[in-house]
Image: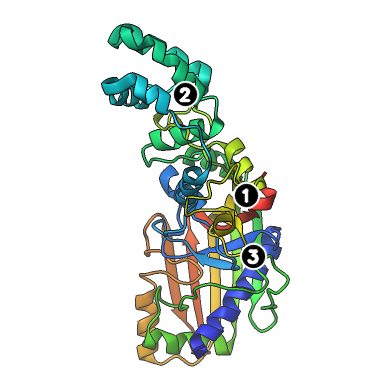
C-alpha cells in the first residue's frame, strides 16, 4: 500500500470511529458513505443507495450503477424459485394470452392474489373475449402460488423499483433531527476498526484534497496527514432514516402512486429460510449458496440512511506548504474536500481555505440547511431481515 493510501486508510478509520461516537451510532451496523455525490435530493437517488448491496467494509464508494444491487439479485432469486407454471391458462387463452398480459400490466390490482386477478380477468373477458371466460380456472390456480404472484409484481414494475419512503419523508424527518457536534484529532483518535461489524475491512480511499487523487495531491495529502489533522464537525440536524422495498401500492402518496409495488417479503423469507429443491429449482444457475452463502451476492442489505443537514466541518493541519502547493489546494477546493466531495458552491455548499503565518492550513466547509448529505448507511445481515 502506498504512503498516501495508508495515510487515508488511517484517517478514514479515525473519521469512522469519531462519527460513530459523535452521532451515537452502532459500529455493528454503520458504514461510511463515500463518493462524489453525497447530497441526496431526489427519491430516485435515495432509492439507488438503498438498492446498492453493502460490501463488508467500514466504508464504501456508492455507485448507483454498481452491478451488485438488491433488485437485480431479487430477480435472480425469483427466477430460481419453484413456481407453478400457468401453462393450462396460456394454452386455454391461445392468441388472447398476450393481449391479456398487456392489459394486466396496465391495470394491475393494488393487491395481487387469486381473487383480485380472477376478478380483473372476468371483467376483461366479458368485454374482450367472452368465449375465454372459462380460462379463469387455470389463471386462479396459477396465482394461488405466491412465487407466481411475486414474479408478476416484479416483472410488471418494468425496471422501475421504488422504496416505501420518499425524499419528502426524509425532509420531514430532518426537520426534527438531532443536533450533533464532535471533534477529531488524528494524533489521538483510534484508527482501530477491528471491533466493528466489518472486522477492520475497508474499501476504496480518496485523496484528502481531490476526488480521485493524483501524484501532486498525494504529496500534499501525505504532508498534511503526517503533520496531524484536527477536525471539528457540527450538524444542525441528523436523522437515521429507514426504508424498505415497495411491497404495497400507495395511491395516496404523490410520488409512490406512480410506481407499482414490486417486492414480496414473504417469498423472500421463504427463499432465505429454505434451501431444498422444494423451494429452489436445481436446474437454475442461482441457488441458496451463491445468493445467501458466505460468498454469496446478497449477505446484507441497506436498511437505513444516516443523513445530516446544516453542516459545518473545520479541518486544519500544520505543515509547511509551498506557494505552488497552496495554489493546488485552493484549486482543489472547487472539487470539494474529504470527507465531502462536492462542487464548490453547488447545492448550497461553500468552502473557505486559509493559510496562516504559522504554517497552519485551515479549510471550512459549510453546507447550508436544505442540502442533506448522506453520511452513511446502516446495513442489516439477511439473517436479521426476516
Crowd tier of the residue under label 2, counting other residues whose Cα lies within 10 Å: few below 14, some 14–19, many 20 or above:
few
- x and y, in percent, of residue 341 in the image: 43, 67
Apparent side of residue 261 relative to residue 346 in the rendered image (left or right) = right
Pointer 1 residue: 240
On-image quarter of the C terminus: top right
Mark found first going from the N terminus, 3 or 2: 3
Mark found first going from the N terminus, 2 or 1: 1
285, 14: nearer the viewer: 285
Q: Nearer the viewer, mark 2 or mark 1?
A: 2
- x and y, in percent, of residue 333 in the image: 39, 72
Pointer 2 residue: 251
Mark found first going from the N terminus, 1 or 3: 3
Determine whether label 1 and label 3 are within 8 Å by CB: no
Image vertical order of residue 103 relative to residue 195, above or below: above
Secondary structure at badge 2 equals loop
Crowd tier of the residue under label 1, counting other residues whose Cα lies within 10 Å: few below 14, some 14–19, many 20 or above:
many
Residue positioned 53% across, 50% down in the render: 282
Image vertical order of residue 361 relative to residue 130, above or below: below
- x and y, in percent, of residue 368 in the image: 48, 54
Amino acid at each position: 500500500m502506498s504512503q498516501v493510501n495508508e495515510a487515508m486508510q488511517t484517517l478514514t478509520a479515525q473519521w469512522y470511529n469519531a462519527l460513530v461516537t459523535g452521532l451515537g451510532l452502532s459500529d455493528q451496523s454503520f458504514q461510511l458513505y463515500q463518493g462524489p455525490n453525497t447530497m441526496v435530493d431526489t427519491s430516485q437517488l435515495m432509492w439507488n443507495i438503498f438498492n446498492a448491496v453493502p460490501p463488508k467494509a467500514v466504508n464504501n464508494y456508492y455507485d448507483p450503477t454498481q452491478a451488485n444491487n438488491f433488485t437485480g439479485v431479487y430477480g435472480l432469486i425469483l427466477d430460481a424459485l419453484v413456481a407453478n407454471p400457468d401453462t393450462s391458462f396460456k394454452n386455454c387463452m391461445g392468441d388472447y394470452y398476450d393481449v391479456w398480459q398487456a392489459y394486466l400490466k396496465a391495470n394491475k390490482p393494488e393487491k395481487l392474489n387469486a381473487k383480485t386477478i380472477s376478478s380483473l380477468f372476468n371483467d376483461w373477458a366479458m368485454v374482450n373475449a367472452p368465449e375465454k371466460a372459462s380460462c379463469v380456472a387455470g389463471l386462479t390456480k396459477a396465482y394461488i402460488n405466491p412465487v407466481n404472484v411475486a414474479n408478476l409484481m416484479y416483472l410488471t414494475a418494468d425496471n422501475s423499483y421504488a422504496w416505501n419512503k420518499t425524499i419528502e419523508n426524509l425532509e420531514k424527518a430532518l426537520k426534527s433531527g438531532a443536533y450533533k457536534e464532535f471533534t477529531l484529532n488524528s494524533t489521538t483518535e483510534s484508527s482501530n476498526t477491528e471491533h466493528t461489524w466489518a472486522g477492520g475491512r475497508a474499501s476504496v480511499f480518496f485523496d484528502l484534497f481531490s476526488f480521485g487523487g493524483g501524484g501532486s495531491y498525494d504529496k500534499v495529502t501525505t504532508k498534511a496527514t503526517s503533520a496531524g489533522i484536527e477536525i471539528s464537525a457540527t450538524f444542525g440536524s441528523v436523522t437515521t432514516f429507514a426504508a424498505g422495498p415497495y411491497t404495497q401500492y400507495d395511491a395516496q402518496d404523490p410520488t409512490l402512486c406512480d410506481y407499482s409495488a414490486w417486492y414480496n417479503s414473504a417469498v423472500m423469507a421463504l427463499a432465505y429460510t429454505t434451501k431444498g429443491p422444494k423451494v429452489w429449482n436445481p436446474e437454475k444457475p442461482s441457488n441458496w449458496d451463491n445468493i445467501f452463502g458466505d460468498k454469496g451476492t446478497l449477505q446484507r442489505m441497506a436498511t437505513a440512511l444516516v443523513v445530516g443537514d446544516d453542516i459545518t466541518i473545520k479541518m486544519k493541519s500544520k505543515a509547511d506548504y509551498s506557494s505552488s502547493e497552496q495554489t493546488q489546494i485552493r484549486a482543489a477546493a472547487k472539487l470539494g474536500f474529504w470527507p465531502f466531495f462536492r462542487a464548490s458552491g453547488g447545492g448550497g455548499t461553500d468552502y473557505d481555505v486559509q493559510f496562516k503565518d504559522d504554517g497552519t492550513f485551515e479549510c471550512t466547509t459549510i453546507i447550508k440547511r436544505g442540502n442533506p448529505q448522506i453520511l452513511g448507511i446502516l446495513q442489516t445481515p439477511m439473517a436479521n431481515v426476516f
